[in-house]
Image (cartoon, rainbow, N blue to C red):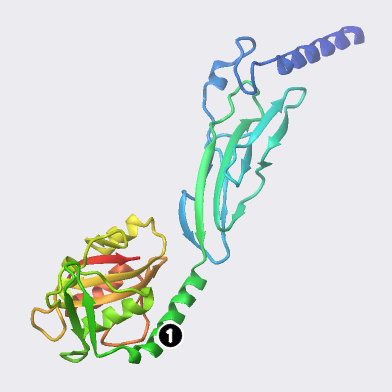
């Protein structure tokens, strides 16, 4: 074959290649009836993340990995401020990426605070393939250490202030009648008195009850007046789920039994639930903060002496 023929074949193939890769489309990624490959253009791209949207506890933030499942040769363009990324592919001998808004993903994305990642994927090997739908991933990243420190400090302050509360705590019920909680109990401090002053210190207000009748520990859940700032739940699991695993504070817990026997039951206040851990204080160890690593751990500590939880009330 002569050199002239070889040169003609080479130039012809290059012209065909440029023609295919430069054929105009209606929009970036929109398929054309000319030179299109149905098998290549109908398979949808998508963007995913290694962490689901939700609440995360991390003092130093988290890192999120973006990827396109089962798709090689794609570029991902993303934002972290909740806006939609904008990018297009420019045809040529080699397809190039032009980003109007956002960044090209190259490594795990560090996040802190409240952030929403939005991302798109573009096939850099096939310009006829549609751009992926926008993937959206929202994160609330909470630093637990400052919250735990604040809870611990507040308990220390309450312990110092506890002696200043009178031995009989009076309250006005929803029916405008007065009831009271005495400090002395069967073995030291009465759980109802301790829980009541604990709440007054933490929230700076009284609990509103539906009745002024004498209230034992087991009676609190049924007789705390339900309101927007006194929200009732059947158990701790329902409380945490309703609050999307975010930190919750000042939770009254009523138990069916009391350690000394009899039908009085028991009541106490959980100061905080942070990252699944429960921080609380009780009348048997007044003014000292205790920690349970989980709801199960907390319930196991009380089940032997206090039985089952009757219900919980989130005070706001």
Q: Is residue 206 left or right of residue 212?
A: right
Tell me residue 245's x, y (percent).
Answer: 39, 59
**Horizontal relation, residue 53 to residue 120: left or right:** left
In depth, the one of 178 and 218 nearer the eye is 178
Residue 74, placed above or below residue 163: above
Q: In this view, does 84 lie above or below 162?
A: above
Of 5 and 253, nearer the camera is: 253
* Rendering quarter of residue 226: bottom left
48 horizontally vs 270: left or right = right
171 left or right, relative to 205: left
In the image shown, does 252 or 292 lie closer to the viewer?
252
What residue appears at the point 34 percent right and 90 percent down from the top-left corner? 164
Q: How far from the left and from the top, in percent, is residue 302?
A: 23, 77
**Which quadrant of the rendered structure holds the C terminus?**
bottom left
For the residue pair 200 and 72, the one nearer the viewer reads as: 200
In the image, what residue occupies the spot 41% across and 60% down?
A: 246
**Quadrant placement of the N terminus:** top right
* Residue of label 1: 157
Asked if residue 240 can be seen in this view, the reply is yes
For mark 1, does the 10 Å Cα neighbourhood hold few (<14), some (14 to 19), or many (20 or more) residues?
A: few
Task: Residue 307: tell me if it is visible.
Answer: no
Give the percent coordinates (x, y) of residue 102: 67, 40
Q: In which quarter of the image is residue 214?
A: bottom left
Residue 70 in the image: above or below residue 249: above
Q: Where is residue 282 in the image (x, y as percent from the top left)?
A: 28, 82
Q: What element carries label 1?
A: helix
Q: Residue furthest left?
A: 262
Say which quarter of the image contains residue 295.
Answer: bottom left
Residue sitting at x 15%, y 76%:
215
**Residue at left 41%, top 64%?**
247
Extreme front residue here? Answer: 176
């Amino acid at each position: 074959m002569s050199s002239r023929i070889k040169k003609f074949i080479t130039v012809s193939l290059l012209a065909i290649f440029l023609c295919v890769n430069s054929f105009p489309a209606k929009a970036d990624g929109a398929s054309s009836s000319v030179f299109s490959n149905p098998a290549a253009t109908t398979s949808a791209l998508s963007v995913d993340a290694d962490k689901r949207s939700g609440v995360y506890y991390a003092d130093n933030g988290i890192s999120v990995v973006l990827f396109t499942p089962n798709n090689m040769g794609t570029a991902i363009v993303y934002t972290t401020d909740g806006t939609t990324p904008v990018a297009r592919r420019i045809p040529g001998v080699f397809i190039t990426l032009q980003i109007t808004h956002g960044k090209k993903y190259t490594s795990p994305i560090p996040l802190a605070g409240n952030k929403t990642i939005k991302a798109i994927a573009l096939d850099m090997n096939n310009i006829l393939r549609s751009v992926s739908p926008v993937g959206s991933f929202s994160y609330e990243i909470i630093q637990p250490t400052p919250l735990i420190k604040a809870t611990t400090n507040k308990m220390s302050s309450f312990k110092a202030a506890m002696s200043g509360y009178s031995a009989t705590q009076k309250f006005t019920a929803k029916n405008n009648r007065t009831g009271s909680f005495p400090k002395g109990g069967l073995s030291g401090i009465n759980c109802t008195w301790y829980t009541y002053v604990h709440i007054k210190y933490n929230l700076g207000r009284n609990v509103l009850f539906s009745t002024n009748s004498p209230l034992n520990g087991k009676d609190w859940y049924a007789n705390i007046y339900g309101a927007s700032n006194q929200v009732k739940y059947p158990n701790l699991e329902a409380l945490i789920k309703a609050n999307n695993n975010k930190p919750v504070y000042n939770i009254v817990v009523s138990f069916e039994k009391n350690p000394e026997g009899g039908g009085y039951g028991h009541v106490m206040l959980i100061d905080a639930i942070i990252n699944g851990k429960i921080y609380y204080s009780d009348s048997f160890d007044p003014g000292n903060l205790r920690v349970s690593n989980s709801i199960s751990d907390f319930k196991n500590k009380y089940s032997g002496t206090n039985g089952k939880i009757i219900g919980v009330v989130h005070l706001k």
